[in-house]
Amino acid sequence: MNIEKSNQSGFDSRAYRDALGCFGTGVCLVAADDANGKPRAITVNSFSSVSLHPPIILWSIDSQSDRYNLFTESELFSVNVLPASDAEVSTHFARYVEAELKGEQLARDSNGVPVYTGALAQFVCRTSWRQKAGDHVVIFGDVIGFNSRDGDALGFFRGNYTSHSIPDLK
């Protein structure tokens, strides 16, 4: 096996991205209000739990994202774990600048934070820390509210959507 070296001038970023794609992830929508109070969202697969006590999560955003300023300046946001049936929702919020949550997609928690109504789990957070890391900013959030329901989760593996479900091992 030939291991690619990331510090060489001929570094193959496509091969690196393909290698990262071997790690299956979940898919989430992160939502927050923009400066005009409109609820916007972005698709991410960089969500992770950091701590149980106190409850802290993290996610990251590309510094070239059209929604970079919105999310790096937001004090409150929600992370919404998508169900397996929401690949189209994920694709929409991954690509479009006018990524406004509206209609039946939108609810607000008791703090007024926008949440996605179709989510398997919702985590409402207060930004506690931001850290620049290469071409992304990692956003840490103190979880101030959450809920969840049963169902299969949307996943992403090797550049394609998949489903995370509990197999029947009987």
Image: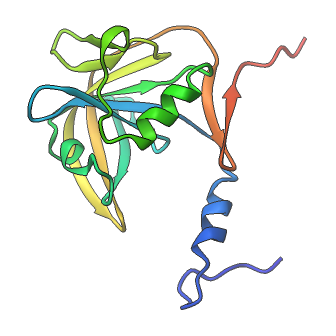
Quadrant of the image containing the N terminus: bottom right
Residue 149, position in %: x, y? 51, 8
Residue 95 lies in what quarter of the image?
Answer: top left
Q: Is residue 35 left or right of residue 58?
A: left
Residue 114 vs 13, above or below: the answer is: above
Residue 27 drawn at (x, y percent): 52, 34
Residue ID at (29%, 27%): 100
- Residue 8 seen from this side: yes
Seen from the viewer's position, the closer of residues 77 and 40 is 40
Q: Between 142 and 104, which is closer to the camera in this rendering?
A: 104
As drawn, the residue found furthest toward the left would be 36
Would residue 145 be seen by someone viewing this image from the given angle?
A: no
- Picture residue at 67% right of the left edge, 61% below the top: 18
Q: How many marks?
A: 0
Extreme residue toward the bottom, this view: 9
Residue 6, how many percent across, how many down?
56, 80
Horizontal side of 28 relative to 146 (left or right) equals: right
Q: Position of residue 90 (x, y in %)?
A: 50, 32
Q: Quadrant of residue 102?
A: top left
Q: Quadrant of residue 170?
A: top right
> Which of these two is toward me, 26 or 159?
159
- According to the image, what is the colour scheme of the structure? rainbow
Q: Horizontal placement of 6 versus 50: left or right?
A: right
Residue at point 58%, 83% (across, down): 11
Q: Which residue occupies 25% across, 20% down?
A: 114
Q: Give the left or right position of residue 53, taking residue 71 as reference.
A: right
Image vertical order of residue 14 relative to residue 149, above or below? below
